[in-house]
Amino acid sequence: MGNYNPVYTRTFENQLAEVSNEVRNRVEEKIADLINDPWHNTEFAKGQYRGKRKLRLNRRDRLVFVICEECRELRHQRYNQCTDCAETPENTIKIAFIIFKHKYD
Amino acid sequence: MARTSEEKAVDRLLTLYLINECYRTHNLRVLSETKLQKLVFLTEKELIDTRIKALNYRFVKLLHPTYSSELSSDLNHFVRMKYLTEPWFGRSAKMRLILEDFNEVFERNHHLLNIIDNVLMRYANIRTNRLVNLVFRMTWRVGRNRLCTIRDLKLRTPLLYPLIIEKAQEVFQITEDELEDLEICLNPKLSKDLDKAFNEMRRGKMLSHEEVFG
C-alpha cells in the first residue's frame, strides 16, 4: 500500500464487476500509482463536481475521486459534504466512480 | 444526422449562457419555452448567417412557429438536472457554478458571444406574442430563388440545421479537456450515475481495498 488509503463506493465495486479482468487489473495498477501520489496527472472536475478530482485511465476513461486531506485544506467540504468527515483519516482517498466514456456517447 | 456529443455539449453551454444573460442583463423575470425557442432560433440564425459554427439545433416550422425538439429536450434535462428551476426556467446555484467555471471558454469566444448579446439586445425584451408574430413575418428563402414568410411555409419545413464545419468561417473554440469537463457536467445520464456515486460517498458507505479487489 502507498501513502494513502483508498476506499470505494458500492457503485465503483459494481462497475468493476462488469469489466474484463484486463480492465480490472489496469484500474488496480492506476490506483496503486494514485495512492503514492494522488496529485500526479490528476485535475479538478468543474461545475457541480467542484472538489472532485479525475485521473486519466486511458484516452477516454476517467477515475473520479476525492483526497480527504486536500478537501479539508481547500475547504471543499462545502462541495463534498461527507457525513463521515470527522471520523475519516487524513490520508484517505475516496474513489467514487469510473467514467467509461463509450457508455455516455 | 444526430448531433455529436461535442455539438450537444456546446449547445447546452451556450443555451445556459443565453438564459443567464436574459435574466442578468435584460432583467427578465420569467422565461417561457416559447420565448426561449424563439431567442435560440434567432441567435442560431444570426450565427449561421455570419458563418459561425456554435449552436447546432435543428429547427422546423411549427405552430408558434419555430421549434427544435433537441432544444426542448435539453431544457427538460436542465430542469431534471437542476440547472434550471421550475416553472419558467429560473436560474439555480448549480447553473451559476458551471457558468463561473467555464468563464475562460466564454472569454476566448467573446466575439461569438457578442453576437448572442446583440441578438438578445434586440429581442429579449419583446413580449412573447410579439416575438412570435415577428418570427412569423420573417422572410425565408425556399429553394434557390423563391422567398416567402415563415408563416407561409408548410408545417415541419426544416428551417435551421447545424452548419457543416467546411462552410464555417469561425468555430466555437473549446479544448478537448474543457469539452470533457463540460460533457461530465451536462450529460444527463453520466450526471445521474455520478450523483448516485457521490451520494454514497456523502453517506460514508465506503468499502475497503480488500473488499473490492480481494
Image (cartoon, rainbow, N blue to C red):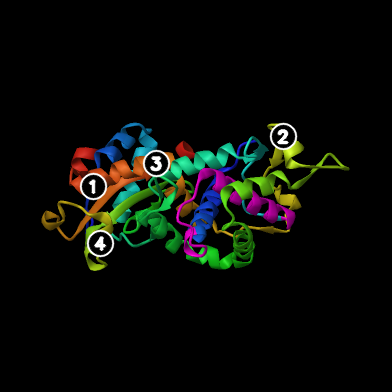
Q: Is residue B77 above or below residue A89?
A: above
Q: Which residues are magenta?
A: B23-51
User: Which of pointers 2 and 3 lies earlier in the amino acid sequence?
Assistant: 3
Q: Magenta stretch: dominant SS?
A: helix
**In the displayed structure image, the side of residue B47 where residue A38 appears, left or right:** left
Frontmost of labels 1 and 3 is 3
Q: Residue at x 57, y 37 (%)?
A: B69
Asked whether B24 falls inside the magenta stretch, the response is yes
Measure the C-alpha gap from mark 2 to mark 1. 49 Å
Q: Are marks 2 and 1 in contact (CB under 8 Å)?
A: no
Does dot 4 land on a helix, a strand or a loop?
Answer: helix
Location of mark 3 (residue): B80
Is B155 in front, or is B101?
B155
Respond whether the residues carrying marks 2 and 1 are from the same subunit: yes
Respond whether the residues carrying marks 1 and 3 are from the same subunit: yes
Location of mark 2 (residue): B157
Measure the C-alpha gap from mark 4 to mark 3. 28 Å
Frontmost of labels 2 and 3 is 2
Location of mark 1 (residue): B201
Q: What is the quadrant of residue B34 in the picture?
A: top right
Measure the C-alpha gap from mark 1 to mark 3. 22 Å
Location of mark 4 (residue): A71
Respond whether the residues carrying marks 4 and 3 are from the same subunit: no
Question: What's under tag 3, amino acid-wise?
Answer: Arg
User: Is residue A8 visible to us here?
Assistant: no
Q: Are marks 1 and 3 in contact (CB under 8 Å)?
A: no
